[in-house]
Every structure is written in C-alpha cells, then in structure tokens.
Amino acid sequence: MRIKRVGSIDASKKRRSIASADGLTLPLFDDRESRVVAIALQSGSNGNCIYVETEDVRLLFDAGIPGSHAEKRLAAYGRDIREVDAVIISHDHADHVRCAGVLQRKYHLPLYMTRSTHEAAKNRCPLGTLNEVRHFRAGQVLHIKNVRIETIPTPHDAADGVAFVVEAACRRLGILTDLGHVFEGLTDIVKSLDGVFLESNYDPEMLRVGSYPDFLKRRIEGPHGHISNQEAAKLLCSAMRSNRMKWACLAHLSEENNQPALAIATHQRILPSDFTLHVASRYESVGSFIL
Ligand SMILES: [Zn+2]
Ligand SMILES: [Zn+2]
C-alpha cells in the first residue's frame, strides 16, 4: 500500500487528496486501487456511524453522532461529508438515528429507513423536519448507483431493525450490529463476507457482576438485545472455513460490560492467529479498512 502525502493535489481526484482541517500531517492511505473503503466514525451505545466508500458511491450507515463530529472525522481522511450520497438507518434506537435530521438538513443528505423505523424514530427523538426520506422494506435490496445493499431483518428489540451487507465490485462488507441473537441464516451471511463490522457487545461475566439492573442485564443477553464476545467470536470462527474474510472490526462494544482488550482476547482464543482483528471505538474514528 502506498502512502499519499498530505496536501497532494490531484485535480482529477480532488476529493481524494488529503487536507487535514487543522493542518496536521496525517499518514493516510492511498486507496486509489481499492474497491471498498470503510471507516468506523464511532461505534457504541453512545452513537453509531460507519462510512463506506466505493469507486463512485459514499454512504453513511446510521446517524448516531453529531453532524459536526462526522464532518470533522471524515475530513481527517480527506473526505467531504457533503459528498455523501445517502445515510442509511438500521433502526430507531437513538444511538443510530438521533442526528439523522441534522445530517439531512445541514448537508442535504437523503435518508433511507423503513417506514416503521421512521415512525418509531420520530417518537423517540426530536428529528425535526425531514425533507428527503426514502422508505424501504426490511429485507429489500437497495441499489445506489453500482452498489447493492442487502437489508437483513434482525430480532433486536427495535421497531423494524435491519443489518446490512454492502456489495460492490464483488466485495461484500457486513455491517452487523444490534443483532438480538445469532439468528437463523446469520452464520451463512457472515461466511459470505470479505470484511465485517460485527457486534461484540459484552463479556457475559462482566455483565453478570456489573452494575446494570437485572432487567437491563436480561434485555442485553436476551434474544432481542445484543450478542456477546463469545457469540461473535464463534460466528467469525465459522466464517473462517470459507477462507474469504480478510478482516473483522469488532463493533458496538459496551462501555460498562466490555473492554476492547478483553473482546480481542476472547476472539483471539478461537480465531486463527494471523486473522486481522480491529476494534471500533466509542470515542473516535477507526479505519480505514479496505477490501
Ligand atoms: Zn445500538
Ligand atoms: Zn439498538
């Protein structure tokens, strides 16, 4: 991988030239030869937003962080949020949708969500006036230019939650969080991927001894909550057999019931030692990951 220098000017690909907002020199990737680029701008119950870029499409998955944060974090990678083609919402929980209105109005970004998610989100968060919402049905395949996006209904306790598989140029990227449990068909989906952001929400022992009230503990580990480090690791392990997956980024880690090092250690215990694992952050962007 070649490194592209800060401030390089390429008139034909100006979008890709690197210009840090604060003038810092950032060691950035050269993605000109790659097909799919992904950056976890933030991941966790405090807000979720994942950026995915292909040759001619730029997408944000979920709108759980302030527009100013998304703009600044994308700018650090030389990306302009105003060039995003669509914001696609997974479900109505506030950590995924609370900033959708701002993203739509401030940057004029079209929003994609199911009708039920839209209705539930309006009741949950003050979204304000939304001018451009495109409804889809959970399970529908979306096409945005040459990108295909599978929407996968999940048993998470949302109104109409979905996870995603983004497919472009024969690469398949999963964005699989807020899953509820390891539902039927999920293992096959993971096996089909080249890279994945995969929920690894909690360590069962930390949850058990932690300070959450019992009803919340039951919700998290129940069939409509989140999946644990162990469950995520087993999922990835089964995907290894297809010999297709290049990397996984553990996502939506609980602050109270997990630790990045513990999540990684749990995965490393059962995954091949040379498999590439990343952990998305609750506080900053992590990436870019390339397929
Ligand atoms: Zn969430
Ligand atoms: Zn959720």
Image: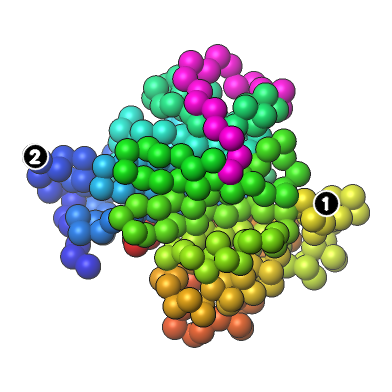
Q: Secondary structure at mark 1?
A: helix
Query: Amino acid type of disc 2?
Result: Ala
Using the image, determine if residue 114 lies above or below residue 78. Answer: above
Q: Nearer the viewer, residue 133 or 198?
A: 133
Q: Residues within 10 Å of mark 2 (few under 14, many from 20)?
A: few
Q: Determine which of the numbered discs, if any, sits on residue 219 in the image.
A: 1
Looking at the picture, how far across and down is residue 235, in whole percent? 62, 70
Give the image quarter of residue 79.
top left
The residue pinned by badge 2 equals 11
Q: Residues within 10 Å of mark 1 (few under 14, many from 20)?
A: some
Q: Which residue is drawn at the image coordinates 70% and 59% (left, top)?
A: 183
Question: x and y percent of residue 56 in the render?
Answer: 26, 42
Query: Foreground residue, 263 or 141?
Result: 141
| Span of residues in magenta | 121-139
Q: x%, y% of residue 46?
A: 63, 44
Tags 1 and 2 touching, CB below 8 Å: no
Amino acid under label 1?
Arg
